[in-house]
Every structure is written in C-alpha cells, then in structure tokens.
Image (spheres, rainbow, N blue to C red):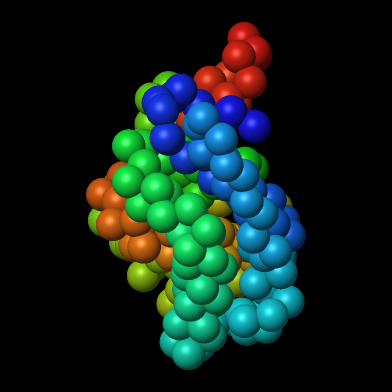
C-alpha cells in the first residue's frame, strides 16, 4: 500500500472492520489487530451510548498498539504527512462535512474530529442515526472509528489528517 501524497516518510492509515493497516512511504508496514468492529466487541461493548470509561479504554488500546509501532520505528513520529483511508474514515469525513461527497484534497481537522466525537458519544444509536451524512452502515461504528483516528492524531500531535477520496487513493476516474 503506497501513501496517497507520495511524501517521503508519509504515513497512510487504513481503517477496516477488524484491523488498522499503517504503511510508511519508503518502507515500513504495520497492522494493528483492531478496528471499529473489534472495539465494539471489546472496549466499547456495544454500549448505547458508550460510557466515559469505555471511551477512555478504547482510545487507550489504540494508543498502546500505536506505541508498539513507534517503538519499532521511531521515525513514524517525524512523518511529514498522514492520510487516513477506508470506508470507515470516509464515513467519518462525510459526517463531519454534514453530507457527501468528500471534496478532493479534504483534510479532517483535529478540532472538528473532537467536536464530532463530543456530539456523537452523547447520543444513543436511535438518535445518532439522524446525523446528516451518517449512513446506517456506520451508525454503530462511527464512535469506534473516531477513537482510532483521534488516538493516532493525538499521539502524533496532528492538527489535521488527509482524507483522500476513492479517486485519489485508487487513481480511478469514478
């Protein structure tokens, strides 16, 4: 998996149901054995809405796994850019935007991700599903996705993270 922006040392973080794949331009790839679905089955225990200690634990487990990546390759801390991909991240971007499509060159700011997090964690699923841009496929997983993205953004002290569109990541002209 190549990074989207092609910068030397840039990271691409792909969030899938049960894993997060991290790749660094120029070499280095890691897989975290968690994803939004595994966090729902574990730390978040499908609580509706999740309790504060569950959110802290979910953020912490992502942080701990990411620390293992940093321990193996400290150069990850100096990455010049980070892009997040995958259907869960795209769903997060659409919710932050209040609807799609995701514009080319979109960057999710950490302050905006934090605001979406604060809003959604207080809502049970029955209310959460009415958020603009949130599809039924991601109503349950959106909070877990936010835990993953925010834990990585916080650890790397990122103000923003690129969220390329499918066209940008695949080169397709869909």
> Which image quadrant: the C terminus?
top right
State which quarter of the image contains the N terminus.
top right
Residue in the picture at 73% in, 76% down: 41
Position of 106 with respect to 54 (left or right) is left
Q: Where is residue 153 in the image (x, y as percent from the top left)?
A: 37, 56
Give the residue displayed 45% in from the left and 82% down from the top: 56
Q: Which sits in the foreground, 82 or 144?
A: 82
Position of 127 relative to 15 (above/below): below
Q: Which picture quadrant has residue 118?
A: bottom left
**Residue at 42% from the left image edge and 49% from the top image edge:** 76
Q: 172 left or right of 74?
A: right
Report whether residue 52 is seen. Answer: yes
Q: Where is residue 98 in the image (x, y as percent from the top left)?
A: 42, 44
Q: Where is residue 123 in the image (x, y as percent from the top left)?
A: 49, 74
Q: How many labels does the image show?
A: 0
Give residue 160's quadrant in the image.
top left
Nearer to the camera, 3 or 9: 9
């Amino acid at each position: 998996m190549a990074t989207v922006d092609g910068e030397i040392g840039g990271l691409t973080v792909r969030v899938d149901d049960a894993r997060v794949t991290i790749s660094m331009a120029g070499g280095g790839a890691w897989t975290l054995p968690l994803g939004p679905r595994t966090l729902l089955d574990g730390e978040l225990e499908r609580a509706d809405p999740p309790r504060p200690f569950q959110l802290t634990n979910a953020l912490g487990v992502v942080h701990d796994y990411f620390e293992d990546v940093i321990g193996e390759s400290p150069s990850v801390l100096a990455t010049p850019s980070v892009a997040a991909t995958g259907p869960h991240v795209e769903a997060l971007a659409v919710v932050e935007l209040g609807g799609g499509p995701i514009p080319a060159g979109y960057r999710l700011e950490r302050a905006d991700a934090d605001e979406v997090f604060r809003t959604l964690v207080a809502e049970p699923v029955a209310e959460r599903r009415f958020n603009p841009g949130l599809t039924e496929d991601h109503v349950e997983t959106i909070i877990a996705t936010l835990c993953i993205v925010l834990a990585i953004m916080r650890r790397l002290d990122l103000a923003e993270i690129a969220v390329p569109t499918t066209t940008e990541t695949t080169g397709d002209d869909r």
